[in-house]
């Protein structure tokens, strides 16, 4: 799959009149390297020209890079030498001269690094944006398979954790159970820090999970996800109520409104729909029932190699292969809140729900 992606990028370089593109990951901060090459290490620079591809990395990753990125020629960083020296080596191997126009990913390169590169790399450097991200917006069949697997395991974790939600247990204890089970079932890490928000804390969409003890009858929002095979992420939110006391009638009403808004948005999702239209379906549904001011965030976001995968929300409508979250919520300060989030993939006929964890029934 990386070979096909590499060829697509090389064609894009020609269209953008670039002779090469530098794609850098440092401490794992740029998933474009993984997407293009298959290399999952934390430090490397890809040097992609219109016809050749190189991976520049250090001794920690020589063997790993050879196995994970077979479509890339390995350039070994030697101790005592700068990475830029080896980038120059790769450019020379590609027979590119100082007049070559070489792009670098401005969104991922610190200003300080860009200044150093402009002095040390023997080419005409130019800042580039979204050269790789344009391809990541739409997932291929292999990516969707991995995302479906990630969501299936995450839903299994949810099923295992729900019985542990009891009065007297703390938010941190529930979060620990979530994180432990994600790793037990195959996650290599979390998509983001798990959120467990109970009682009045559930009125904060991104509450910082703490030591508050759960109380009978109150809402508990659990928002979590894992990084699974291939580096693909899941992201699910469910709201449950602590056993031992009947939930407040208004909280039941809010739950039903949020769930119905979630379902309405999913039903409206299909190729050609814009992000604004998608958001408006759920927002209008909630607003018509008197809770417009309590839905305080966007309806969803792109999902893939990171929890918030790259997407040009303003200009690119949904198309087959878009993977998006659907997460309406209502949050009332001093009372509590509800959020229900699913991961969806756009198909030719509409949308498929990847997160099949059950909803509550009253």
Image: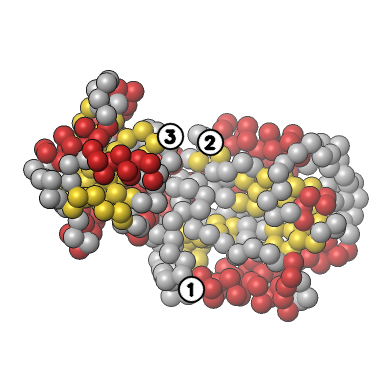
Let me know if residue 63 appears in the view: no
Residue 309 pos. (x, y %):
46, 53
Label 3 residue SS: loop
**Mark 2, residue position:** 189
Q: How is the image coloured?
A: secondary structure
Residue 286 pos. (x, y %):
71, 73
Q: Is residue 115 above or below residue 252?
A: above
Give how far apart the Cα atoms at labels 1 and 2 are: 32 Å
Residue drawn where x is 34% and y is 23% of the image: 60
Question: Disc 1 or disc 3, which is closer to the eye?
Answer: 3
Closest to the observer, 169 or 313 = 313
Give the mark, 1 or 3, whose residue is nearer the N terminus: 3
- Disc 3 crowd, CA 10 A, few/some/many (<14, 14-19, 20+): few
**Mark 1, residue position:** 274
Left or right, 103 with reference to 112? left
**Mark 3, residue position:** 27
Label 1 residue SS: loop
Give how far apart the Cα atoms at labels 1 and 3 are: 34 Å
Indicate the quadrant where residue 67 lies.
Answer: top left
Closest to the observer, 65 or 152 = 65
Residue 353 pos. (x, y %):
54, 60
Label 2 residue SS: strand
Left or right, 202 with reference to 324? right
Do the numbered discs 1 and 3 sit on residues whose CB atoms are within 8 Å?
A: no
- Disc 1 crowd, CA 10 A, few/some/many (<14, 14-19, 20+): some
Residue drawn where x is 17% and y is 42% of the image: 122
């Amino acid at each position: 799959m990386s070979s096909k992606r590499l060829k697509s990028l090389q064609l894009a370089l020609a269209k953008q009149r670039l002779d090469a593109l530098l794609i850098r990951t440092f401490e794992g901060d740029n998933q474009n390297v993984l997407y293009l090459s298959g290399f999952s290490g934390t430090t490397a620079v890809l040097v992609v020209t219109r016809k050749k591809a190189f991976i520049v990395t250090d001794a920690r990753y020589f063997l790993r890079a050879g196995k994970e990125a077979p479509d890339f020629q390995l350039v070994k960083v030697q101790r005592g030498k700068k990475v830029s020296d080896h980038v120059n080596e790769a450019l020379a191997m590609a027979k590119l001269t100082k007049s070559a126009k070489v792009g670098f990913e401005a969104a991922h390169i610190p200003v300080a690094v860009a200044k150093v590169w402009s002095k040390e790399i023997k080419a005409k450097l130019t800042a580039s944006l979204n050269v790789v991200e344009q391809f990541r917006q739409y997932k291929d069949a292999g990516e969707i398979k991995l995302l479906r697997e990630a969501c299936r395991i995450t839903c299994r974790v949810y099923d295992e954790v729900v019985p542990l939600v009891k009065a007297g247990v703390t938010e941190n204890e529930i979060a620990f159970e979530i994180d432990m089970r994600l790793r037990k079932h195959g996650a290599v890490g979390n998509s983001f820090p798990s959120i467990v928000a109970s009682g009045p804390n559930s009125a904060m969409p991104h509450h910082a999970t703490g030591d508050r003890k759960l109380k009978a009858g109150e809402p508990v929002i659990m928002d979590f996800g894992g990084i699974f095979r291939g580096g693909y992420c899941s992201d699910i939110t469910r709201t449950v109520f602590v056993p031992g006391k009947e939930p407040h009638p208004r909280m039941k009403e809010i739950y039903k409104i949020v769930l119905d808004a979630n379902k309405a948005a999913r039903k409206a999702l299909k190729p050609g729909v814009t992000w604004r239209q998608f958001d408006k379906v759920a927002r209008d549904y909630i607003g018509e029932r008197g809770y417009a001011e309590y839905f305080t965030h966007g309806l969803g976001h792109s999902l893939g190699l990171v929890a918030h995968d790259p997407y040009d929300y303003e200009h690119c409508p949904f198309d087959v292969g878009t993977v998006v979250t659907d997460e309406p919520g209502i949050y009332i300060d001093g009372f509590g809140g509800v959020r229900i989030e699913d991961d969806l993939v756009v198909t030719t006929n509409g949308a498929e729900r990847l997160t099949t964890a059950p909803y509550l029934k009253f």
